[in-house]
Amino acid sequence: MRTIKHWIDGRDTAGESSRTAPVWNPATGEHQADVLLAGPADVDAAVRAARTALAGWADTSVMRRSRLMFAFRNLVEKHLDDLARMVSAEHGKVLEDARGELIRGLEVIDFACGIPHLLKGEYSDQVSTDVDLFSFRQPLGVCAGITPFNFPAMVPMWMHPIAIATGNTFVLKPSERDPSASNLVAELYAEAGLPDGVFNVVHGDKVAVDAILDHPDIAAVSFVGSTPIARYVHERATAGGKRVQALGGAKNHAVVLPDADLDLAADQLIAAGYGSAGQRCMAISVAVAVGDVAGPLVKLVREKAQAIKVGPGLRAGSEMGPVVSPEALERIRGYIRSGVTAGADLVVDGRDLDVQEDGFFVGPTLFDHVTPEMDVYRDEIFGPVVAVVRVGSLEEAIDLINGNDLANGTAIFTASGRAARLFQRSVQVGMIGVNVPIPVPMAFYSFGGWKQSLFGAHHMHGPEGVAFYTRAKAVTSRWPEDAEDGPDLHFPTAV
């Protein structure tokens, strides 16, 4: 059985803890590898390596850091197919979806390559007589990332390229369900010339997470996962004085108005609801049908959902792969049973899927006549389940969205600019799509939701990512030539 190790101080290592967890092949149900689970001593070893490397890396010129990011970016692009195959083999998503994940991660590295411009400070001449004022930003120190299984390459790339480019060192704790891509990324950093200890990978479960949250030498923690764990990470890490950005769960609604192009809306609901088997924090899990559009919309989505080709992610022609684990499969089946029991209309039942493989497959599932009291509406299912809620007006749809505690992303399908403008100004959600179902901002903007979908003041990547991984200094200076007349005890003002 292959064992996946940690990457600490420029090499792979078994560390001190002998605990392991299985890494499944979701398409076959095969136990394909074991991953080592770090204990506190292993986390401490990674932090010590990062701490040792910090002074030299933080003092490295911004141009050298930029050139290294360019080299790293080129290596990621060169190995994009290798990384995508690793992701597909351990996560289950189809190969083209995995490639798309890598390309969106590359865009963040592209952004980090421009770090000389992004770190430019401000300068004001002669703010007072013979006094100048300027500002600049410096790295925080050792930073850590705790990332989820659903994007094992992209979500870490929201964090470590910007953290490292701004002069920090980094400890990554990826999901133990699909760990291999992070180790290859570490090797590519080393090949690009990154000094040992600047980027480290420790695999693990809650033991490793708690060790990161409590470690006194970690200055900042970035997290993506469910809302309960995001809240836990934020509370525990901030109690220790750390800076934290913790992105939580989602229940993303797509509103379809009667004037929408129904074929387009149905296609986009299929893509956003069932892509990656619904295991995306920006997946559309609720379709809000306004007025008399509901019947035709449900009919179209049903036809398109039943035509989706479900199969192994590495098989040519597969459009949707399995879910990540046997536990995920049972959880999703449980929600389908709950929806039926609650009285929702099960239009397409993913439990009826007929596949030849023994993997963790559940097909596209569609509920109609769902109400906000039902579990299939309230909870983040994180699977290929779309719930249709029928409302009478756009205002009712907006009220429904604003009444939900999860506010990651939302979308509207309409031909009306006035309706779209009302929607985008009224919904209390961080990321909004207009005829775009998965409104993930480009890397030069920032990613993050509102309400219970984000804990902390900063969104990820883009300008807010740079701000999160740095802190500002403001310097007021003068160079007097003559002795002054004596102390002035008044509060200083500009003269």
Image: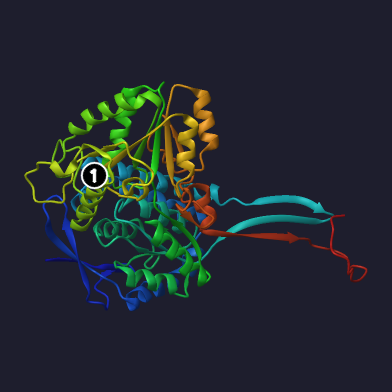
Question: What residue is shown at x 48% (from left), y 36% (from top)?
Answer: 398
Question: What residue is shown at x 66% (from left), y 56% (from top)?
Answer: 135
Q: Quadrant of the N terminus?
A: bottom left
Q: Nearer the viewer, residue 269 or 288?
A: 288
Say if residue 178 shows up in the picture: yes
**Residue 94 appears left or right of 106:** left
Q: Decide: few, some or many residues near mark 1? Use Cα within 10 Å; few <14, some 14-19, many ≥20.
A: some
Q: Which residue is mark 1?
A: 340
265 over 482 or under it: above or below: above
* Picture coordinates of residue 32, whole percent (x, y): 13, 60
Tell me how the rendering is colored.
rainbow
215 over 161 or under it: above or below: below
Q: Quadrant of the C terminus?
A: bottom right
* Picture coordinates of residue 151, whole percent (x, y): 31, 51
Q: Nearer the viewer, residue 303 or 475?
A: 303
133 over 111 or under it: above or below: below
* Picture coordinates of residue 246, whole percent (x, y): 45, 58
Question: What residue is shown at x 50% (from left), y 23% (from top)?
Answer: 417
Determine the secondary structure under disc 1: helix
**Residue 314 appears left or right of 177:** left
- How many labels, in total? 1
